[in-house]
């Protein structure tokens, strides 16, 4: 129940295309869903996050879609650019303070955007 | 220039040796975390600390130890009891533990056992 399943493991997209990464969770108590972006040899950085009271959140070219009934959420990268080539991690937590709010990470998706 | 620093960037260890990875933050964050990252495995929580002089085990604490004597510092020791220590180690911090608080990550230390 603590797992977050992420797919695909790797993704190749042409420049200008749409990249879509999906995550699924089991624990219905999760109520905070961030996405992190990691470049090779660097630490991850928060990209965008959503709470389940909304079905979609958009920040620039990045959009999170959230389907509470299906217990799924996804990251969409519009107009993908070579500079977006990185590993993306979804995560989930209960959004509570203390240890109950520890993040559970998916296994990551390596995105390559071809010029 | 606020942030999290980790040192060294690369570390080589002989089998049977203990090694200590450094993590320092000047963000005035109360909470700090250590994660292990293996290829295709995502980030797994080793230890976390919500406040000075207090820390809790994460999902994979066996073979690791930590201390939190200062708010700014959260060193991780990889002991000889850790059977497969070769990995990329990431330190993170947040204003307080859990909640909706963004975790800020350091640049990581890559540990290799020779």
Image (tube, coloured by chain):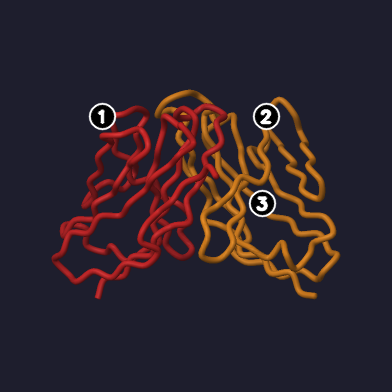
Chain colours: A orange, B red
Q: CA distance from mark 1 to mark 3?
A: 39 Å
Residue at image x 40%, y 54%? Answer: B6
The answer to whether B5 appears left or right of A113 in the picture is: left
Quadrant of the rendered image containing residue B58: top left
Q: Can the viewer see residue B72 in this picture?
A: yes
- Chain designation of label 3: A
Q: Which residue is mark 2?
A: A52
Q: Which residue is mark 3?
A: A22
Label 3, secondary structure: give it. Answer: strand
Question: Which disc is residue B53 wearing?
Answer: 1
Residue at image x 28%, y 62%? Answer: B85
Image quarter where the C terminus of chain A lies is bottom right
- Chain designation of label 1: B
Quadrant of the rendered image containing residue A67: top right
Q: How many marks?
A: 3
Q: CA distance from mark 2 to mark 3?
A: 16 Å
- Chain designation of label 2: A
Near mark 3 (Cα within 10 A), the count class, few <14, some 14-19 or many ≥20, is: some
Query: Where is residue B104 shown, x and y percent of the image?
Result: 52, 43
Q: Which mark's residue is nearer the viewer, 2 or 1? A: 1
Furthest residue in direction left, as rendered: B16
Label 2, secondary structure: give it. Answer: loop
Query: Where is residue B49 shown, x and y percent of the image?
Result: 34, 34
A85 is higher (above) or lower (below) than B6: below
Q: Can the viewer see residue A1 in this picture?
A: no
Residue at image x 39%, y 60%? Answer: B109
Sequence-wise first label, 2 or 3: 3
């Amino acid at each position: 129940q603590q797992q977050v399943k992420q797919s695909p493991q790797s993704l190749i997209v042409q420049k200008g295309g749409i990249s879509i990464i999906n995550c699924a969770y089991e624990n219905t108590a999760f109520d905070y869903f961030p996405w992190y972006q990691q470049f090779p040899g660097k630490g991850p950085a928060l990209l965008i996050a959503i709470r389940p009271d909304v079905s979609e959140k958009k920040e620039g070219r990045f959009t999170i879609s959230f389907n509470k009934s299906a217990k799924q959420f996804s990251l969409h990268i519009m107009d993908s650019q070579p500079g977006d080539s990185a590993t993306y991690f979804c995560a989930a937590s209960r959004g509570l303070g203390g240890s109950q709010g520890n993040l559970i990470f998916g296994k990551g998706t390596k995105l390559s955007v071809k010029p | 220039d606020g942030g999290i620093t980790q040192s060294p960037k690369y570390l080589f260890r002989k089998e049977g040796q203990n090694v200590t990875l450094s993590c320092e933050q000047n963000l005035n964050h109360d909470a700090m975390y250590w994660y292990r990252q293996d290829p295709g495995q995502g980030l797994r929580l080793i230890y976390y600390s919500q406040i000075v002089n207090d820390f809790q085990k994460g999902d994979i604490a066996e073979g690791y130890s930590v201390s939190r004597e200062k708010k700014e510092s959260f060193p991780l020791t990889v002991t000889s009891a850790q059977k497969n220590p070769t990995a990329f180690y990431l330190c993170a911090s947040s204003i307080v533990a859990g909640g909706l608080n963004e975790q800020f990550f350091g640049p990581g230390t890559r540990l290799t056992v020779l």
